Amino acid sequence: MKSHPLFIAVPALLLSLTALASGGHGASHGAGPEAIGKPGVAARVTRTVNIDMRDDMRFHASLIHARRGETIRFIVKNSGKVRHEMVLGTEKELKAHDESMKKSPEMAHAAPNMATVAPGKTGEIIWHFTTAGKVGFACLQPGHYDAGMKGLVQVSGGNATHKEIHHAH
């Protein structure tokens, strides 16, 4: 049976649109499960962490402790007058994404490991931490990363259970 050209062209087009929707700069969003975890499921959230983003170019709550296996809902509030964002990633990914943002500051993008938040608004990231180690986060709006708007999630080893996390509050 001969394939119709549309059966080849349509999937290729959809794949390219997926790449554009992820920001158009590939690996900087490539927070693979082995590196920092994976998008979490709301029904499995074990705790909520509130982070305030301000125009002093700081995250207020910049060091977060988590356990491997934990799913955290990050509520990120922008108390400033300019747009801020929280992006989870490795240091290498965050630096690469920061460089891309400098070249294309109005780049529109969205991914499960990020929340871009307008002034006075609130965003959310739900993330499941699968590996012990350090997971960075940063605001990658042009100039904000260089000004020091970054933080760290320190993920300890050992699997977290819902019961352990619930009693840790």
Image (cartoon, rainbow, N blue to C red):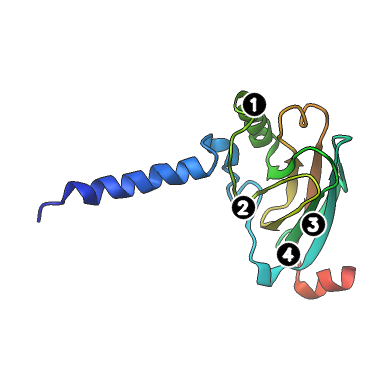
| SS class, disc 4 | loop
Give me the residue at 78% from left, 26% from top. Answer: 146
Disc on the earlier residue, 2 or 3 = 3
Q: Which residue is mark 3?
A: 66
Amino acid carrying label 2: it is Pro
| SS class, disc 3 | strand
Q: CA distance from mark 4 to mark 1?
A: 35 Å
Packing grade of label 2 (10 A; few <14, some 14-19, many >=20) is some
Amino acid carrying label 4: it is Asn
Q: 120 left or right of 97?
A: right
Packing grade of label 4 (10 A; few <14, some 14-19, many >=20) is some
Residue furthest to the bottom in view is: 163
Q: CA distance from mark 3 to mark 4?
A: 10 Å
Q: Percent x, y for residue 77?
A: 81, 51
Give me the residue at 66% from left, 57% from top. Answer: 130
Q: Which residue is mark 4?
A: 159
In the rendered view, would you say 11 is above or below 107?
below
Q: Quadrant of the C terminus?
A: bottom right
Q: Which residue is mark 2?
A: 112
Amino acid carrying label 3: it is Ala
Q: Which mark is residue 99?
A: 1
Q: 87 left or right of 168?
A: left
Query: Which is more toward the observer, 88 or 108?
Result: 108
